[in-house]
Image: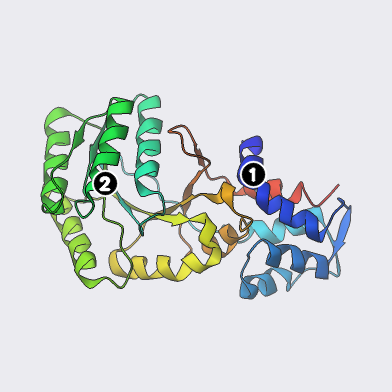
Amino acid sequence: MFNLFKKVLGKTNDAIHDVVPKKKKNITKDEFEDILLEADVNYTLVEKLLNELPDKINRIQAFNSMISVFQYSIPEPSQVTPFVEMIIGVNGAGKTTTISKLAHRYKEDGKNVILGAGDTFRAAAIEQLTRWAKKLDIPIIATQQGHDPSAVVFDTISSAKAKGYEHVIIDTAGRLHNQTNLNEELKKMIRIANKAQVGAPHRKLLILDGTQGSSSINQAKAFHDMVGIDGIIITKLDGTAKGGSVLSIADELQMPIFYIGTGEQPEDLITFKPNAYVNTILDEIFI
């Protein structure tokens, strides 16, 4: 796990080395501030993290300060079958690839999965998800571009119930939080899911592009206000030095970060572990 987080945070740790080239037993408060800002932790949170720290900071003190951000509660996953997840986010965040990774993970755990190609706005999205489904040997419910995505939601959940699938993962069209028509469509998809199975979708996951850093927070807040997000998956974190934005995202949104994407392959998805994340950063700072 630590090696995987080291891979994910490679560019972030390179940026940290620019601030503190050599590991130390203690760092100054100013150095810690520079490290956090360099890693794209927003300034308000930096001030909060530094507030109760001494002028000279050791590893334990830095750890306790950073880990305090991850105090959100993680609800126990519903045991209902099928367990329906809806994947939400803007275009380019990595929704379709993330769906393939989730499906692969469930299949590796011995669970059977069905996909719903609910992004009928883009033909390429349907084709891409269908290719992943074939590659992973997982069934998919898909229609043509322009068709009603809520019908895909209903058919996918109905098929899962009829055939005994344990997991349903539904794609949605990439949208900005201010696109009224698409957002009304998303709300309709959620209503139809509940008609197909009471309580569905059981988890609405927002995909955030790690390369956007802390700037993705307002986007996440808008989606949460709109439909109620249950948790986050962060993608592309390995391609940016903004790894500290995870702290800002956790602090401001106070909702679980479930997974981190680590690459383009189906197996490139790791469960987010706050301790491992914090320790991987501190390993680059302290002796």
- The foreground one among 70 and 224 is 224
Residue matched to label 1 = 276
Is any atom of residue 111 visible in this view?
A: no
Give residue 39's quadrant in the image.
Answer: bottom right
- First-in-chain label (2 vs 1): 2
Residue 118 drawn above or below residue 160 = below
Q: Give neighbour class at mark 1: few <14, some 14-19, many 20+ (Cα, 10 Å).
A: some
**Which residue type carries mark 2?**
Ala
For the N terminus, the image quarter is top right
- Whether label 2 touches label 1, CB < 8 Å: no
Residue 166, horizontal then vertical, whole percent: 26, 33
Q: Residue at x 27, y 70 (%)?
A: 179
The alpha-carbon separation of the residues under discs 2 and 1 comes to: 36 Å
Image location of residue 124, percent across then percent down: 26, 46
- Numbered label tally: 2
SS at mark 2 in the image: helix
Depicted 206 relative to depicted 219: above or below = above
Q: Residue at x 13, y 45 (%)?
A: 144
On the picture, is 24 further left or further right than 190?
A: right
**Which callout, 2 or 1, points to the residue nearer the camera?**
2
Residue at image coords 43%, 54%: 232
Residue 118: x, y in percent? 21, 49
Question: Residue 52, located in which quarter of the rendered image?
Answer: bottom right
- Secondary structure at badge 1 equals helix
Left or right of residue 198: residue 279 = right
CA neighbours of label 2 inside 10 A, class few (<14), some (14 to 19), many (20+): few
Q: Amino acid at mark 1?
A: Ala
Residue 193 is at least partly visible in this image: yes
Residue that numbered label 2 is attached to: 124
In this image, 183 relative to 55: left or right?
Answer: left
Question: Image point 55% across, 62% down: which residue?
Answer: 213
